[in-house]
Image: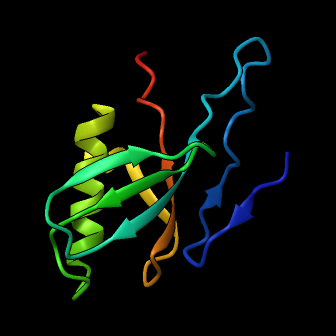
Amino acid sequence: MRTRTNSLGGGLRPPPPHNRTESPPSSELLRVRVQPKARRNEIVEQPDGSFRARVTAAPEDGAANRAVVALLAATLDVAPSRLALVRGAASRDKLFRVEPPPRRR
């Protein structure tokens, strides 16, 4: 097995291969259309499977994005740290990844 060396001369080993009988947990992608400065905070599922998020926060300095993450986390009953904004930080159309919970050893 080849190892890469870092600048200090130590070897970096690649991660061990996955157990073939266990598939790694997969993440889920959510398409969200955001409406900032709405009257109330709510999430509505659209007929095509995407979501519309209405948040009262203004789209300034990422406040609306933080509000959408908090609203999605509360709606999906997951920790906000498990939600990652993949695409659309400055757009109304966003793509979020929901990471699976960590595996227990």
Residue depicted at 61% across the width and 70% down the height:
9
Quadrant in the picture for the N terminus: top right
Looking at the image, which is closer to me, 12 or 76? Answer: 76
Residue depicted at 22% across the width and 64% down the height: 55
Residue 53 shown left or right of residue 28 in the figure: left
Q: Tell me where residue 58 appears, x and y as whole percent.
A: 19, 81
The residue positioned 41% from the left and 29% from the top of the image is 101
Q: How is the image coloured?
A: rainbow
Q: Does residue 12 lie above or below 78 as drawn?
A: below
Residue at 20% in and 76% down:
37
Residue 65 occupies which quadrant of the picture?
A: bottom left
**Which percent across, then down, holds residue 75?**
28, 37
What is the number of callouts on the image? 0
Residue lying farthest to the top in this orientation: 21
Horizontal side of residue 19 vs 75, given as left or right: right
Answer left or right for 86 relative to 3. Answer: left
Residue 16 x/y as whole percent: 69, 34
Q: Is residue 72 above or below residue 41?
A: above
| Image quadrant where one finds the C terminus | top left
- Name, please, the residue furthest toward the bottom: 60
Q: Is residue 56 left or right of residue 93?
A: left
Answer with the quarter of the image where residue 31 lies: bottom right
Q: Is residue 99 above or below residue 102?
A: below
Instruction: Report the front residue among 69 and 92.
Output: 92
Report x, y in % for residue 5. Answer: 68, 67
